[in-house]
């Protein structure tokens, strides 16, 4: 690759990141329904065709927005949220804190309803194997369940909990719980997602209500 080619490649990567960040901001601030290709292209100073030069389609761009949301919300670093080994290392060492952190992430998500709307909308499209949403949600779901199972397995062992379901079964229920609560919250903004999630998870695990998943400001990179 020549110096000129490397320069063009670097500019392309930078432009793609610029578009992605603009799209994420517009969805978060204006809401999913108010996010259009035209609004994104104007935000970065290029044409609609120019935006789609860097992404296969609007759906592809929206899926990349969700990936970026995952990175920003969970990892707080440049690493991919779908990197299972990295996640296991971060969250497996302190499972009780990991649950508290997941509840905190849910609480933070409520401050950007547009991104929850986007997640719910793209989840419906994930039923089509030809959609980029299918690949994203299938991969994300698998990794998320493995991560939840790992955390729950360690928590059950550490706290000597007696559960009626296996960690793998609990991870599916927990995944459905957290996803379902976000959809319900879109309909009823008075729903206290973190509180309901906390009570439900403790009940599933047979944990004492005194095991409060209080919010924490601990950085995920310290786990």
Image: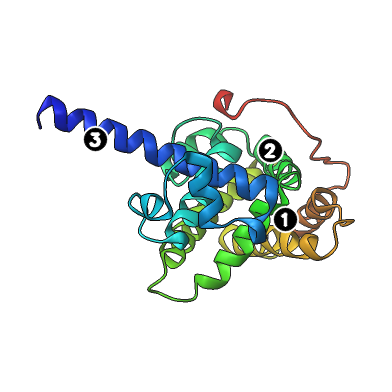
Q: Single out the mark in the foreground, 3 or 2.
A: 3
Q: Is residue 186 left or right of residue 4?
A: right
Q: Secondary structure at mark 2?
A: helix
Q: Is residue 126 left or right of residue 175?
A: left
Q: Quadrant of residue 93?
A: top right
Question: Do the residues bearing badges 1 and 3 touch, measured as CB atoms within 8 Å?
Answer: no
* Picture layout, residue 79 above or below residue 19: above
**Residue at the image position 64 percent from the left and 52 percent from the top:** 115
Q: Percent x, y for residue 144?
A: 53, 53
Q: Percent x, y for residue 188?
A: 85, 62
* Category of crowding for the residue at label 2, using alpha-carbon neighbours closer than 10 angstroms: few (below 14), some (14–19), many (at least 20): many
Q: Percent x, y for residue 212?
A: 83, 40
Of labels 3 and 2, earlier in sequence is: 3
Of labels 1 and 3, earlier in sequence is: 3
What's the mark number on residue 101?
2
Q: Secondary structure at mark 3?
A: helix
Of labels 2 and 1, earlier in sequence is: 2
Instruction: Give the camera-side residue of 17 and 84.
Output: 17
Question: Do the residues bearing badges 3 and 2 touch, measured as CB atoms within 8 Å?
Answer: no
Quickly name the residue at label 1.
162
Instruction: Give the camera-side residue of 198 and 170.
Output: 198
Q: Single out the mark in the foreground, 2 or 1.
A: 2
Q: Secondary structure at mark 1?
A: loop
Q: Quadrant of the N terminus?
A: top left
Q: Single out the mark in the foreground, 1 or 3.
A: 3
As measured in the structure, the alpha-carbon distance from the residue carrying label 3 to the one carrying label 2 is: 37 Å
Direction bottom: furthest residue? 128
**Residue at the image position 24 percent from the left and 35 percent from the top:** 9
Quickly name the residue at label 3.
9
As measured in the structure, the alpha-carbon distance from the residue carrying label 1 to the one carrying label 3 is: 55 Å
Q: Percent x, y for residue 48?
A: 43, 54
């Amino acid at each position: 690759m020549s110096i000129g080619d490397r320069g063009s490649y670097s500019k392309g990567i930078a432009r793609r990141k610029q578009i992605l960040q603009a799209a994420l901001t517009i969805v978060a601030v204006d809401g999913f329904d108010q996010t259009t290709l035209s609004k994104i292209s104007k935000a970065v100073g290029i044409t609609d065709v120019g935006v789609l030069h860097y992404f296969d389609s609007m759906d592809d761009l929206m899926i990349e927005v969700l990936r970026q949301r995952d990175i920003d919300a969970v990892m707080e670093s440049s690493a991919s949220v779908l990197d299972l080994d990295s996640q296991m290392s971060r969250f497996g060492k302190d499972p009780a804190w990991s649950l508290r952190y997941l509840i905190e992430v849910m609480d933070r998500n409520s401050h950007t309803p547009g991104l929850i709307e986007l997640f719910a909308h793209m989840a419906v499209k994930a039923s089509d194997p030809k959609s980029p949403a299918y690949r994203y949600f299938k991969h994300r779901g698998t990794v998320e369940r493995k991560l939840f199972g790992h955390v729950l397995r360690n928590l059950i062992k550490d706290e000597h909990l007696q559960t009626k379901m296996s960690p793998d079964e609990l991870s599916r229920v927990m995944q459905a719980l957290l996803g379902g609560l976000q959809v319900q919250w879109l309909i009823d903004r008075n729903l206290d997602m973190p509180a309901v999630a906390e009570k439900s998870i403790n009940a599933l695990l047979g944990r004492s209500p005194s095991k409060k998943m209080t919010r924490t400001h601990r950085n995920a990179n310290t786990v």
